[in-house]
Image (spheres, rainbow, N blue to C red):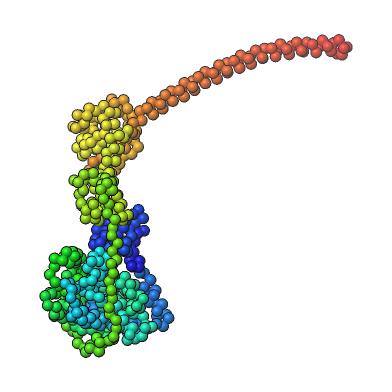
């Protein structure tokens, strides 16, 4: 299967909604996000409907359709009859709106539904099987081929109405034309890619995507011209979206068989299991993956009406139909046959110690640890272990396991932290206190069961926080009677209405700081003494120098005078 459907892996928020809702667990998950396993996917679109990241599928459809128009290709619209439920009161204007978008011909796919029904009738006349299963729902077809391949031979070997109508349109308007199918089901986007070689359908839009296309081209449905389809099928075919292909036709089943209609994923799974066991009586079965049929297809998540209103609109729409002769069209020589293959890729199943090892990694040491809560998306812990073994899930997806692990880490921090940690309620009672606090505050462990903060700290800060709901951080506090100094951080936890006190003992740092200050003070005093002594010595030296200098001056003066007298100079 081509990679048509992709989830928003880059913006995955690890909610596991897609895994929980996937009926075949085709979603793999790792640290890079979610990914659809195409080998298991049945194109039901449920993951798209629940994903909060608004994933998109096949985004180049609009570009492709515009390219067809720019290259002067004849564009033909094939519209699923469920459109009458989706577009409400303006449904009759849809053909006009599509022609505004550039479609030359607009037909209803009920033409293909009638043709497929006739082929079903032919197969029923020839059948010798215990069971016959309608092949109109592509999701059911994939489900059987990929997960219940032993039932594939019970499927009618007939193509879907979408592909049948595409073939009819190509035969009618020429093989060079481009057929665009408008569907209530995202699965049709995958289906047409599997028939690309036949060239029956060239592109598929969901009704929601058609709405976006009209908005881009400024085509307003309420103001579009009301006009009929260029061709349409029978009244019974128009009821197909809500009642299936057999209900309104009063089909005679082969002798000994009964007709059974089944809607919804859970009912379909139960039916497939019954068929696999062979416990069901011989029957012709029409299986719809969606509950209430195509009027609850994946595209209808964007529609506000409930299914009762949609069903009423479909019935009213069918009742307004004027039946037209169809025999010539039904006898067209178009190949409607197809085959189904075994596409199952079994999961590897861990056995014995391998399974137990994975369970232990998940924190499931004993059977009672296997809560089977489904939070991770898997029904049982063992089913999740199998997914881990196949690389489709991760151990940390288990919420109880991660919570227990988180609580264990929290407990380890609380028990072994050197910080003094305790919780104080509005009555100023200490609700919980860690061993470091008991030790540093010299509190007896038994006393800790009935301890109030006022017996160990100044409670003024606590009262202030309860009144203001504002934290007090980084405050240095002396506790003289305990002989310690702490940095006090008081955090108000509003949800629990308690104060988390985290005290960091800085007594030794304070003592070292005081010792350093004392040493600095002593050093300064010693330096001052040295300086004073040096100044006194300097002064004494200066005084002695002054006296010797004066004596030297007197002697030198006398010597000069004597020298001058001896030379006869006056």
54, 456: nearer the viewer = 54
Q: Quadrant of the C terminus?
A: top right
Q: Is residue 316 visible?
A: no
In this view of the protein, can residue 513 be seen by the observer? yes
**Viewer-side residue, 481 vs 66:** 66
Among the 4 quarters of the image, the one containing residue 238: bottom left
- Give the residue at x 27% y 71%: 340
**Relative to residue 471, is residue 283 depicted above or below?**
below
User: Which residue does the image show at 19% across and 77% down from the upper left?
Assistant: 127
Q: Where is residue 217 in the image (x, y as percent from the top left)?
A: 36, 77
Number of residue marks = 0
Determine the residue located farthest toward the right in the rendered image: 568
Q: In which quarter of the image is residue 216?
A: bottom left
Image location (x, y in percent) of residue 272: 19, 66
Q: What residue appears at the point 23 percent right and 36 percent down from the top-left corner?
A: 432
Residue 60 sits in quarter: bottom left
The quarter of the image holding the N terminus is bottom left
Q: Is residue 514 above or below residue 147?
A: above
Up the image or down, 102 lies above or below 19; here it is below
Tell me where residue 347 appears, x and y as whole percent: 28, 58
Residue 179 image position (x, y, % from top left): 34, 80
Most distant residue in the front direction: 128
Q: Which residue is at 77% across, 13% downward?
A: 557
**Residue at the left extreme, as displayed:** 256
Front-most of residues 374 and 299: 374
């Amino acid at each position: 299967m081509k990679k048509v459907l992709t989830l928003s892996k880059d913006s995955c928020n690890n909610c596991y909604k897609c895994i929980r809702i996937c009926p075949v667990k085709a979603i793999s998950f790792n640290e890079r996000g979610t990914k659809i396993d195409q080998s298991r996917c049945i194109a039901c679109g449920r993951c798209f409907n629940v994903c909060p990241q608004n994933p998109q599928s096949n985004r180049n459809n609009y570009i492709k359709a515009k390219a067809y128009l720019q290259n002067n290709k004849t564009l033909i619209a094939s519209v699923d009859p469920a459109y009458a439920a989706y577009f409400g009161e303006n449904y009759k204007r849809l053909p006009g709106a599509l022609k505004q978008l550039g479609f030359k011909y607009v037909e209803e796919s009920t033409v293909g539904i009638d043709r497929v029904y006739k082929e079903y009738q032919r197969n029923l006349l020839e059948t010798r099987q215990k069971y016959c299963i309608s092949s109109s729902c592509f999701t059911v077809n994939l489900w059987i081929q990929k997960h219940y391949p032993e039932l594939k031979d019970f499927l009618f070997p007939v193509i879907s109405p979408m592909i049948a109508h595409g073939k009819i349109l190509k035969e009618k308007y020429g093989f060079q034309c481009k057929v665009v199918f408008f569907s209530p089901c995202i699965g049709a986007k995958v289906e047409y890619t599997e028939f690309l070689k036949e060239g029956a359908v060239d592109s598929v839009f969901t009704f929601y995507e058609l709405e976006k296309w009209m908005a881009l081209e400024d085509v307003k449905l309420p103001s579009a011209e009301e006009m009929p389809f260029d061709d349409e099928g029978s009244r019974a075919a128009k009821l197909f979206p809500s009642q299936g292909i057999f209900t309104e036709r009063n089909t005679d089943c082969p002798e000994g068989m009964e007709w059974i209609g089944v809607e919804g994923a859970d009912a379909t799974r139960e039916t497939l299991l019954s068929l696999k066991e062979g416990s069901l009586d011989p029957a012709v079965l029409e299986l719809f993956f969606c509950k209430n049929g195509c009027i609850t297809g994946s595209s209808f998540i964007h529609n506000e009406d409930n299914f009762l209103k949609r069903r009423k609109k479909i019935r009213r729409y069918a009742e307004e139909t004027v039946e037209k002769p169809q025999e010539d069209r039904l006898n067209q020589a178009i190949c409607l046959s197809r085959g189904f293959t075994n596409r199952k890729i079994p999961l590897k199943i861990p056995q014995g110690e391998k399974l137990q090892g994975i369970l232990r990694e998940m924190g499931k040491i004993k059977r009672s640890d296997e809560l089977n809560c489904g939070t991770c998306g898997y029904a049982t812990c063992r089913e999740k272990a199998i997914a881990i073994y196949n690389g489709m899930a991760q151990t940390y997806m288990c919420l109880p396991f991660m919570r227990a692990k988180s609580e264990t880490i929290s407990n380890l921090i609380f028990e072994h932290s050197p910080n003094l940690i305790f919780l104080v309620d509005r009555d100023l009672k200490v609700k919980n206190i860690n061993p470091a606090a008991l030790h540093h505050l010299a509190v007896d462990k038994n006393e800790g069961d009935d301890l109030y903060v006022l017996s160990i700290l100044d409670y003024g800060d606590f009262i202030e926080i309860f009144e203001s709901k504002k934290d007090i951080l980084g405050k240095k506090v002396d506790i003289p009677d305990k002989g310690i100094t702490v940095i006090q951080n008081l955090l108000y936890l509003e949800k629990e209405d308690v104060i988390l006190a985290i005290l960091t003992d800085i007594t030794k740092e304070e003592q070292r700081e005081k010792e350093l200050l004392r040493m600095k003070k002593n050093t300064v005093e010693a330096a001052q003494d040295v300086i004073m002594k040096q100044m006194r010595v300097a002064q004494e030296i200066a005084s002695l120098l002054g006296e010797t200098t004066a004596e030297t001056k007197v002697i030198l003066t006398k010597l000069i005078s004597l020298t001058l007298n001896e030379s006869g100079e006056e």
